Image: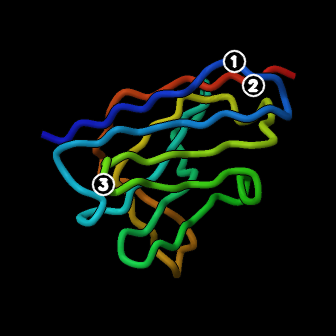
Amino acid sequence: DVQLQASGGGLVQAGGSLRLSCAASGFTFDDYAIGWFRQAPGKEREGVSCLSSSDGSAFYADSVKGRFTISSDNVKNTAYLQMNSLKPEDTAIYYCAPCYTVEVLGNMYDYDIWGQGTLVTVSS
């Protein structure tokens, strides 16, 4: 069974930083790209970042470019999301999940495989 456990969320002031972690099991990052998604209150879930398993390239949503950095430790099967310069609009539940990108569409997508998320709250 695929299991995904995100952690590291919390309450932070605007301009602050957080580092999220994602422990994955039941698949490896060689099999699937791993990414982060988020869902803000009253909004649909959206893709944040997706790290390619083939060439190590990373996709970032425009809203987080230059502020967030995705990485992974393939030995530990753990992914990370370093979030800097946080804004109140980054407030959401963050989920890690296998992902893929479609270059011609300039977006990232999920496989509808989800685990427990972690809440990030950014105060103004």
Q: Residue at label 1?
A: 11
Residue 12 against residue 59 in the figure, above or below:
above
Q: Amino acid at mark 2?
A: Val
Q: Which image quarter holds the N terminus?
A: top left
Q: Quadrant of the C terminus?
A: top right
Mark 2 residue crowding within 10 angstroms, few (<14) / some (14–19) / many (20+): many
Instruction: Give the image's coloring scheme.
Output: rainbow
Location of residue 31 by image quarter: bottom left
C-beta proximity under 8 Å, tags 1 and 3: no
Measuring 55% from the left and 34% from the top, which residue is drawn there? 39
* Residue that appears at 68% across and 42% down: 83
Residue 122 got which mark? 2
Drawn side of residue 53 relative to residue 90, left or right: left
Relative to 79, 114 lies left or right:
left
Mark earlier in primary sequence (2, 1): 1
Q: Residues within 10 Å of mark 1 (few under 14, many from 20)?
A: few
Q: Residue at 54% of width from left, 36% of height from top?
A: 20
Residue type at mark 1: give it: Leu
Measured Cα–Cα span from mark 1 to mark 3: 30 Å
Instruction: Give the alpha-carbon distance from disc 2 to disc 1, as whole Å.
Output: 6 Å
Q: Circle 3 — which element?
A: loop
Local SS, label 2:
strand
Q: Are marks 2 and 1 in contact (CB under 8 Å)?
A: yes
Position in image of residue 40 (x %, y %): 61, 30
Label 2 near label 3: C-beta < 8 Å? no
Residue drawn at x 54%, y 67% as measured from the top left? 58
**Which residue corresponds to mark 3?**
75
> Which of marks 3 and 1 precedes in the sequence?
1
The answer for how far apart the CA atoms under marks 3 and 2 are is 32 Å
Q: Mark 3 or mark 2: which comes first in sequence? A: 3
